Amino acid sequence: IARLNRNWIFKEAFTTVSDKPEDDNNFITKPITFKDIEKPTETEDEFIIPNSFANVIVSAFAMNRDMMQCLATSMAHAAAALCYSRMVAHDMWICQFIRNQGYYAIPSCNGVGQSVAFAVEAGLGQASRMGTIITPEYGPMVRLSKIFTNMPLIPDKPIDFGVTEFCETCKKCARDCPSKAISEGPQSYEARDIHNANGRYQWHNDHKKCLQYWVESGGDCGI
């Protein structure tokens, strides 16, 4: 559990305007705002999160290691897809429990905010050179989901088990990355592209190269 740090909330989120995926311009973006309202609301112009939302429940779902080592194949796709299926069911159950207690909850897999940042603050692991979280139990072989809520909760604390120091010297992920999207250099405040957060001290990776390789290889996210 982490406090809802608004620094990690996206400026915008996308939504569908039609139930027909083949429609042109089916997806639109709306700004995410915080206001003094009772419950989460979507209007024609924005997504509104109540100011009373103070906590985030972050969960990590372990992927099947043997299946993921088959990238890029349908076997690895299935491992990732299974995690996302588990996420949806898990988040629905937790959100329904929260609502049954009289509170509100917003389920979120990859949307609304930065999963790794919230997971780090929730004490699930540490940020790595790859840009993913590394957990003590499963390393980086996890997918993350988040639930935003106004339910009163006690936050966990970040942990430190040496990931930063390890990543400073290891660099294996950067050397072996087929798209060369992972930085081999030191952490920096300077972003490499528009997909990095300029001014944040971290390893900045080239997400355009990553996505391009992902599409060209026919694989899934994760190597």
Image (cartoon, grey):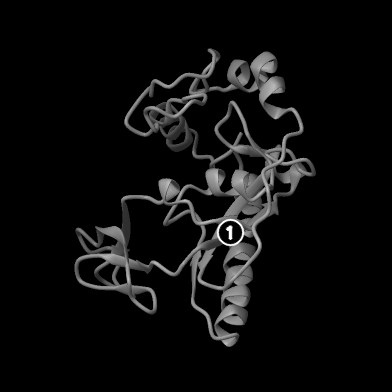
Asked if 145 appears above or below 166 in the picture, the reply is: below
Residue lying at the far right in this picture: please name it: 137
Residue 112 located left or right of residue 1: left
Residue 142 located left or right of residue 212: right
Asked if 97 appears above or below 115 in the picture, the reply is: below
The crowd level at tag 1 (other Cα within 10 Å; few <14, some 14-19, many 20+) is some
Asked if 48 appears above or below 172 in the picture, the reply is: below
* Residue at image mark 1: 84
Image quadrant assignment for residue 209: top left
Question: Considering the numbered disc 1 on the image, is that residue within a helix, a strand or a loop?
Answer: helix
Q: Residue at x 53, y 49 (%)?
A: 115
Horizontal and vertical percent position of residue 169: 68, 14
The N terminus, quarter of image? bottom right
> How many circles with numbers are drawn on the protein?
1
In this rendering, does residue 81 appear at all? no
Observer-nearest residue: 181 or 99? Answer: 99
Horizontal and vertical percent position of residue 165: 70, 21
Image quadrant assignment for residue 16: bottom left
Horizontal and vertical percent position of residue 162: 74, 28
